[in-house]
Image: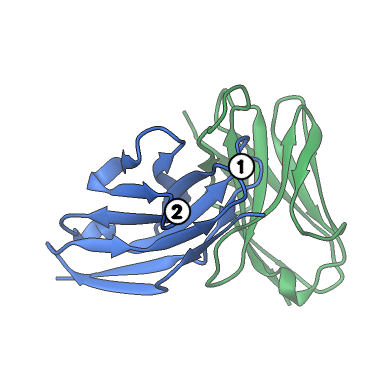
Chain colours: A green, B blue
Amino acid sequence: DAGVTQSPTHLIKTRGQQVTLRCSPKSGHDTVSWYQQALGQGPQFIFQYYEEEERQRGNFPDRFSGHQFPNYSSELNVNALLLGDSALYLCASSLVISSYNEQFFGPGTRLTVL
Amino acid sequence: AQSVTQLDSHVSVSEGTPVLLRCNYSSSYSPSLFWYVQHPNKGLQLLLKYTSAATLVKGINGFEAEFKKSETSFHLTKPSAHMSDAAEYFCVVSNYNNNDMRFGAGTRLTVKP
C-alpha cells in the first residue's frame, strides 16, 4: 500500500503565476482533503472533495480551486499566486462511509512563491 | 465554531522523563479530538483519537490522552520520553463528519539525552 502520495515535492513559482498540485489517495479511500501549512503554524483546512464535488470549504479565496477525478485522485489549483501562498500543502485521504475516520496525510508539496 | 489552543509552543524534556503536551478546545457540539505527530520531511501521523467513547484514550508509541469535558482539555502524555519522540505535535478538533478539522499551532517537543 503506497499510502497518500503527492507531486511534486517542491515547487518554485513567481507572483501572479498559477500552480497545480496533485494527490493520490490511499488505496480504498474516496475522500480527499487539502490543507495549507505555513511555516511555524498548524495546517489550515482548504477544502474537501467527495464524489468529484467540493463537500466543504475553509476560509480560502476563490483563487484556490480543486478537482477530484473518477479514480479519487485530486488536484489543487492556485491562481494569481501571492507571496503569502508560500507554504507546505498537505493532502489527506479518508473513507467517508463511517464517521470519525482517520485522515491519512501525504508528505506534502513545498511551494515557494518569489 | 470550533478551535484548539496548544498552550506550549515548545516543550523540552530529558530522555526517560514524562511528557505532557497541553491542549484546550472550544466546540459548540460534542467534538472529535485527535493528536497528530509530524516528523521533519514526513507526513502527519495519527497518534490517537477521542470520539465520545472512553475518556482515556491510548495511542501508538506509548502516548495517551484524557478528555476532560469540564476543563475542555485533551492533554497528551507519555510516561517516558524517547529520543525518537522529538517532533512537532498537533492537537486537532473536528466535527462529526471530519470535514472541518481545526489544527492547533503545534508544540515542538525536544528530547535531551
Looking at the image, the residue that sits furthest to the front is B70
Apparent side of residue B29 relative to residue A46 in the rendered image (left or right): left
Q: Which residue is mark 2?
A: B42
Secondary structure at badge 2 equals loop
Q: Residue at x 67, y 54 (%)?
A: B1
Q: CA distance from mark 1 to mark 2?
A: 26 Å
Q: Assign the C terminus of chain A to one quadrant of the image.
A: bottom right
Q: Which residue is mark 1?
A: B95
x and y, in percent, of residue A16 in the image: 87, 71
Q: Residue at x 39, y 72 (%)?
A: B8
Q: Residue at x 15, y 65 (%)?
A: B15
Please state which of residues A37 and B11 is positioned toward the viewer in this rendering: B11
The first of marks 1 and 2 along the sequence is 2
Q: How many numbered discs?
A: 2
x and y, in percent, of residue B37 in the image: 40, 54
Apparent side of residue B30 relative to residue A84 in the rendered image (left or right): left
Q: Residue at x 42, y 50 (%)?
A: B35
Give, as a three-letter code, the residue at label 1: Asn
* Rendered image quadrant of residue B50: top left
Q: Is residue B40 visible?
A: no
Residues at discs 1 and 2 both on one chain: yes
Give, as a three-letter code, the residue at label 2: Lys
Report the mark closest to the observer, 1 or 2.
Answer: 1
Mark 1 neighbour class, 10 Å CA radius: few under 14, some 14 to 19, many 20 or more: many
